[in-house]
C-alpha cells in the first residue's frame, strides 16, 4: 500500500466528462459530492478503532490503518476540488442541502450509534471498493469512451486505491467483533444510505441540465439515466451478494481487476509517493 501525492488540475475539466452519457457522469458527480463527508467519517472511525485496539492489533494492521487514513485524506481533498468545480458550474443548489444532511447523519452515527455500528457501516462501504474497481476497469469500457482526462484519472485512481486498501475495515471489524449478521447489516445499510443520496442528487443535476438546455430530449435523458443506474446495479450487486455474503469472506483474496495495479504504479511514478 502506498500514499501517492496525486494532485489533479480540474481547471479545464468538463462537468459532462462523458459527453455521450451525461447522466452516467452525473451519478458519479453526485457520488463525488458525498466523498468528503464520507471519507472524513471513515478516517474518524478507523482512527477510533485503531486506538481502541491498541497493541491488541498487529503492527501490520495498525500500519495499514494509518495508510488507509492517509489515502482517504488524499481522496477527499481531490474530490473537494472537483466539487468546487460543480458549484462554480451552478450545481451547488442540487447537492449542498443533501450534503449537509449527509454530514448530519454521520455526526449522529458517531455520537449516538456507537463504534460497532460505525465500523460495520464503513466496512460495508469498503466492500464495494473492489467491485467498483471491476465496474470501472473491466465492465463499463463503453461508458468510459471520450472521458475528459482529469475526471477520468480522479475516479480511476480513487477506485484503484479502494481496491488496494480493501482489507483494512474488514480486518479491524474482525479483530474486535467479527459477527456475520452485523457485518451484513452494515453492508446493506451503507448501500441504501449512499446510493439513495447519489441517485437523488444525480437526478436533480440532470433535471437542471434539461431545464437549462445543457441536456436535450427529456425522454432520451430519462432512458439514459435508467440505463446508467441499471449498469451500476447489474455490475456491482451480484458480486457483492456472491462474495461478501459468504461467512468466510476475505477481501484479500479478491484478484485485482485488469489494469488496476498498472494504474497505481503509474500514479506512483507520475505524482510521487509520500509513504509506503
Image: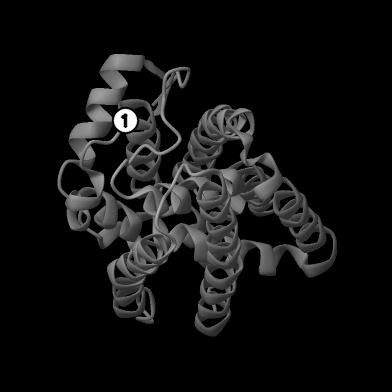
Residue 55, x across and y down, in percent? 61, 47
Left or right, 74 with reference to 162 = right
Q: Is residue 256 visible?
A: no
Above or below, comparing residue 192 to residue 143 in the picture: below
Snapshot quadrant of residue 161: top left
Q: Is residue 169 visible?
A: yes
Left or right, 110 with reference to 40 = right
Residue 12, x across and y down, in percent? 42, 19
How many marks the image carries: the answer is 1
Snapshot quadrant of residue 231: bottom left
Above or below, comparing residue 242 to residue 149 in the picture: below
Which colouring convention does the figure follow? Answer: one colour
Secondary structure of residue under mark 1:
loop
- In the rendered view of the protein, which quadrant contains the C terminus? top left
Closer-to-camera residue (90/201): 90
Q: Residue furthest right?
A: 111
Closer-to-camera residue (69/146): 146
Q: Residue at x 46, y 49 (%)?
A: 26
Q: Residue at x 28, y 36 (%)?
A: 147
Q: Residue at x 38, y 82 (%)?
A: 247
Binning the other alpha carbons within 10 Å of mark 1 as few (below 14), some (14 to 19) or many (20 upward) gives some
Left or right, 192 with reference to 147 = right
Snapshot quadrant of residue 192: bottom right
Above or below, comparing residue 218 to residue 54 in the picture: below
Above or below, comparing residue 156 to residue 163 in the picture: above
Residue 15, x across and y down, in percent? 45, 35
- Disc 1 target residue: 148
Residue 253, x across and y down, in percent? 25, 61
- In the rendered view of the protein, which quadrant contains the N terminus? top left
Amino acid at each position: 500500500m502506498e500514499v501517492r501525492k496525486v494532485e489533479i488540475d480540474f481547471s479545464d475539466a468538463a462537468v459532462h466528462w462523458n459527453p455521450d452519457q451525461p447522466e452516467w457522469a452525473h451519478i458519479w458527480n453526485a457520488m463525488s459530492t458525498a466523498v468528503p463527508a464520507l471519507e472524513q467519517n471513515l478516517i474518524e472511525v478507523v482512527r477510533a478503532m485503531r486506538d481502541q485496539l491498541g497493541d491488541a492489533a498487529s503492527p501490520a494492521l495498525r500500519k495499514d490503518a494509518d495508510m488507509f487514513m492517509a489515502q482517504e485524506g488524499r481522496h477527499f481533498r481531490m474530490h473537494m476540488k472537483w466539487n468546487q468545480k460543480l458549484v462554480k458550474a451552478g450545481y451547488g443548489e442540487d447537492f449542498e442541502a443533501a450534503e449537509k444532511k449527509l454530514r448530519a447523519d454521520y455526526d449522529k452515527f458517531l455520537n449516538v450509534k456507537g463504534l460497532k455500528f460505525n465500523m460495520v457501516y464503513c466496512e460495508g462501504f469498503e466492500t464495494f471498493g473492489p467491485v467498483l474497481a471491476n465496474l470501472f476497469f473491466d465492465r463499463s469500457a463503453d461508458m468510459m469512451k471520450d472521458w475528459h482526462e482529469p475526471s477520468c484519472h480522479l475516479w480511476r485512481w480513487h477506485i484503484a486505491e479502494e481496491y488496494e486498501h480493501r482489507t483494512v475495515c474488514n480486518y479491524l471489524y474482525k479483530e474486535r467483533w467479527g459477527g456475520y449478521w452485523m457485518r451484513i447489516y452494515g453492508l446493506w445499510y451503507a448501500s441504501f444510505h449512499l446510493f439513495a443520496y447519489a441517485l437523488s442528487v444525480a437526478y436533480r443535476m440532470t433535471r437542471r441540465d434539461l431545464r437549462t438546455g445543457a441536456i436535450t430530449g427529456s425522454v432520451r435523458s430519462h432512458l439514459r439515466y435508467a440505463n446508467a443506474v441499471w449498469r451500476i446495479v447489474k455490475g456491482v450487486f451480484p458480486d457483492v451478494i456472491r462474495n461478501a455474503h459468504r461467512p468466510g469472506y476475505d477481501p484479500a483474496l479478491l484478484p485485482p481487476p485488469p489494469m488496476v495495479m498498472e494504474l497505481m504504479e503509474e500514479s506512483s511514478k507520475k505524482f510521487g509517493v509520500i509513504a509506503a
